[in-house]
């Protein structure tokens, strides 16, 4: 009986680790690799933004999205990988420092990390790409609610 319990916990743990939230995949499809101009009125469905939604915050997020879209719109083959399942070789100079409640995911194409996402309560609280840190440099993600 004890072994059955351990087996069940192991299976649940593996399934939890392999879970990729649909919200990230939908966001990537809708905004990051979209062929047409994204519908920015849908941002609040995917992202946690400040309550007052200052126009500067929304414009900054739109600029990030447009930059990533210009770079990644031709991306056809990608996967969203939880931080704990990503091989350390892929994370070289792309690790971020985050100890919050959310889970960290990476957008990977081929053998290259293109972006990261932090998900909390099934919403994206941080995303970014274009990051290349120097050896021993700390990279702290910008939280969208703090913009």
Image (cartoon, rainbow, N blue to C red):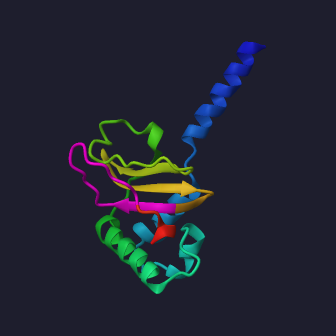
Q: Is residue 132 magenta?
A: yes
Q: Main secondary structure of the magenta part?
A: loop
Q: Please state, as top left, top right, bottom left or bottom right, where the N terminus lies in the image.
A: top right
Outermost residue toward the bottom?
Answer: 55
Relative image position of residue 102 (x, y in whole percent): 55, 51
What residue is rendered at 58% in x and 44% in y? 19
Specify the quadrant of the image occupied by residue 46. bottom right
Specify the quadrant of the image occupied by residue 135. top left
Relative image position of residue 45 (x, y in whole percent): 60, 71
Magenta-colored span: 125-141
Question: Would you place residue 36 above or below residue 9 in this image?
Answer: below
Q: Please state, as top left, top right, bottom left or bottom right, where the C terminus lies in the image.
A: bottom left
Q: Does the magenta stretch include residue 96?
A: no
Which residue is at the front of the view, 111 or 102?
A: 102
Relative image position of residue 142 (x, y in whole percent): 41, 62
Question: Would you place residue 89 above or below residue 1 in this image?
Answer: below
Which residue is at the front of the view, 76 or 67?
A: 67
**Is 130 positioned to the left or the right of 20 in the image?**
left
């Amino acid at each position: 009986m004890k072994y059955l319990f351990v087996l069940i916990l192991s299976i649940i743990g593996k399934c939890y680790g392999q879970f990729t939230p649909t919200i990230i995949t939908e966001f990537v499809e809708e905004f990051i690799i979209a062929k047409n101009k994204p519908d920015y009125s849908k941002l609040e469905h995917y992202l946690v933004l400040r309550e007052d939604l200052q126009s500067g915050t929304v414009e900054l997020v739109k600029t990030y999205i447009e930059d990533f879209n210009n770079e990644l719109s031709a991306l056809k083959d990608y996967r969203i990988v939880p931080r704990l399942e990503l091989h350390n070789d892929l994370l070289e100079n792309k690790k971020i420092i985050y100890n919050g409640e959310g889970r960290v995911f990476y957008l990977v194409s081929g053998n290259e990390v293109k972006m990261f996402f932090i998900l909390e309560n099934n919403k994206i609280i941080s995303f970014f790409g274009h990051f290349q840190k120097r050896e021993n440099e700390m990279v702290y993600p910008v939280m969208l609610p703090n913009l």
